[in-house]
Image (cartoon, rainbow, N blue to C red):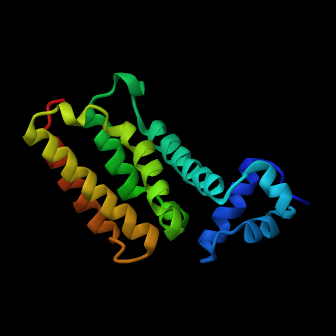
């Protein structure tokens, strides 16, 4: 049976990435059980398909981090949001499809810009903090991103004990942030 919704198509494309395959209209159409024109009905260009994948992955991350918030996002502080971010990145289940923005060298600039735009909502207001606090938040984000990247690529994945130490270091840095 053909997968004909955008969400089903994106799920098939992410499975291709997880399996180490390359994303093309042909590979996604075949995996989805669609014709190439059927796929192009939903995604007119390869760039649209790839941006859809980035948005799909970012939406999943957003839902996971939102679920960890104890108060509404708009009322949360930078320290709270950074804590949620590092927690999600360090304790979350790694997925090779998370690095979708790096899977097409020709579109990498557009894809990484979209990813940065989507994830940066968790750090809105960072530029308004004083230098020490801005540096602590940035250090926490880099710790989180490193753990996330290690898990998604399978390279130097921290052990559970190391993850606990990474989280403790991040929380120590966050304790120095007032906002």
Q: Is residue 71 visible?
A: no
Q: Position of residue 34 (x, y in %)?
A: 86, 61
Q: What is the quadrant of the N terminus in the image?
A: bottom right
Residue 2 found in image quarter: bottom right
Looking at the image, is 20 positioned above or below residue 149?
below
Q: Position of residue 14 (x, y in %)?
A: 63, 63
Q: Is residue 1 visible?
A: yes
In the displayed orientation, state which residue is furthest to the right.
Answer: 1
Q: Residue at x 44, y 59 (%)?
A: 109
Looking at the image, is 72 positioned above or below residue 118?
above
Q: What is the quadrant of the C terminus in the image?
A: top left
Is residue 82 left or right of 5 when viewed as pictured?
left
Q: Position of residue 94 (x, y in %)?
A: 47, 64
Q: Residue at x 31, y 38 (%)?
A: 123
Looking at the image, is 13 positioned above or below residue 75?
below
Q: Residue at x 15, y 48 (%)?
A: 172
Residue 176 found in image quarter: top left
Q: Number of numbered discs present?
A: 0
Q: Position of residue 8 (x, y in %)?
A: 75, 53
Is residue 100 left or right of 79 when viewed as pictured?
right
Q: Residue at x 69, y 57 (%)?
A: 11
Q: Nearer the viewer, residue 95 or 135?
A: 135
């Amino acid at each position: 049976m053909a997968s004909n919704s955008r969400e089903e198509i994106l799920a098939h494309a992410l499975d291709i990435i997880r399996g180490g395959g390359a994303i093309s209209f042909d590979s996604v159409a075949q995996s989805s059980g669609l014709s190439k024109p059927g796929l192009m009905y939903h995604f007119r260009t390869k760039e649209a398909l790839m941006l859809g994948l980035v948005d799909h992955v970012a939406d999943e991350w957003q839902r996971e981090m939102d679920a960890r918030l104890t108060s509404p996002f708009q009322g949360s502080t930078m320290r709270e949001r950074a804590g949620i971010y590092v927690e999600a990145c360090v304790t979350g289940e790694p997925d090779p499809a998370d690095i979708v923005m790096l899977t097409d060298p020709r579109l990498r600039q557009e894809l990484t810009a979209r990813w940065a735009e989507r994830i940066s909502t968790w750090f809105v207001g960072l530029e308004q903090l004083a230098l020490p606090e801005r540096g602590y938040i940035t250090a926490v984000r880099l710790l989180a991103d490193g753990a996330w990247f290690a898990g998604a690529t399978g390279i130097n994945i921290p052990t559970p004990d190391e993850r606990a130490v990474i989280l403790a270091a991040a929380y120590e840095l966050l304790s120095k942030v007032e906002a």
